[in-house]
Image (cartoon, rainbow, N blue to C red):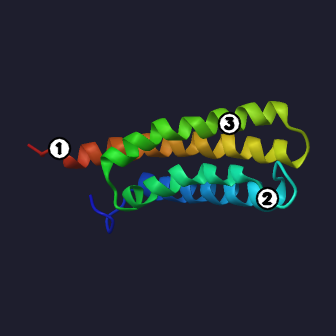
Amino acid sequence: MNATTRSPAQGLAITLLLALVMLCIVWELWLAPLRPGGSWLVLKVVPLLLIAPGILQGRIYTYRLSTMLVLAYFAEGTVRGYADRGLSQWLAWGETALSLAYFAAAIFAVRQMRGAARPRS
């Protein structure tokens, strides 16, 4: 499969990855930053941005790598979901939900890509 013939799971994974990036940016810069005026914690999106080209191109290795990477966002969201209060707590639970949904979509995308790569007999 290439970028022009994406599976539904790949499309969902791309959408969820972009949603996670956007959530992290608006959370740490505007909605509920650790410090008023924005936080350097916004740099947590850099790893997601580094894998984005491979995800968009449908590289199976990048999808596999991303499933391990997104677990860090799940952990952060869970910890801050329990520790923070107010809007930050809700955003943290949103991060947890998006990271779990991305994980599942990426796993399904890898399974579909592996199935499409196998020769049919």
Q: How far apart are marks 3 and 1 (CA)?
A: 37 Å
Taking the spot 12% from the left edge, 45% from the top edge, the residue there is 119
- Residue under numbered circle 2: 38
Q: Which amino acid does label 3 sit on?
A: Glu
Identify the residue at horizontal 70%, vertical 38% (top origin).
77
Residue 23: percent from left, percent from top: 69, 56
Q: In this view, does 39 lie above or below 93?
A: below
Residue 118 numbered tag = 1
Q: Where is residue 6 in the image (x, y as percent from the top left)?
A: 36, 61
| Label 2 to label 1: alpha-carbon separation | 48 Å
CA distance separating discs 3 and 2: 18 Å
Could you tell whether 16 is left or right of 108 in the image? right
Which residue appears at 49% of the width and 52% of the height?
A: 13
Q: What residue type is labelled 2?
A: Gly
Q: Where is residue 2 in the image (x, y as percent from the top left)?
A: 28, 62
Helix, strand or loop at disc 3? helix
Q: Residues within 10 Å of mark 1 (few under 14, many from 20)?
A: few
Q: Which callout, 3 or 2, points to the residue nearer the camera? A: 2
Q: Are marks 3 and 1 in contact (CB under 8 Å)?
A: no
Mark identifier at residue 76: 3
Using a 10 Å C-alpha cutoff, classify the residue at mark 2 as few (fewer than 14 neighbours), some (14 to 19) or many (20 or more).
some
Q: Is residue 45 visible?
A: yes
Q: Nearer the viewer, residue 111 or 42?
A: 42
- Judging from the image, what secondary structure is the residue with disc 1 in? loop
Q: Nearer the viewer, residue 111 or 48?
A: 48
Residue 62: give its label: none
Q: Which of 63 and 121 is in front in this view?
A: 63
- Residue 108 lies left or right of residue 20; in this view the side is left
Residue depth check, mark 3 versus mark 1: number of the one nearer the observer: 3
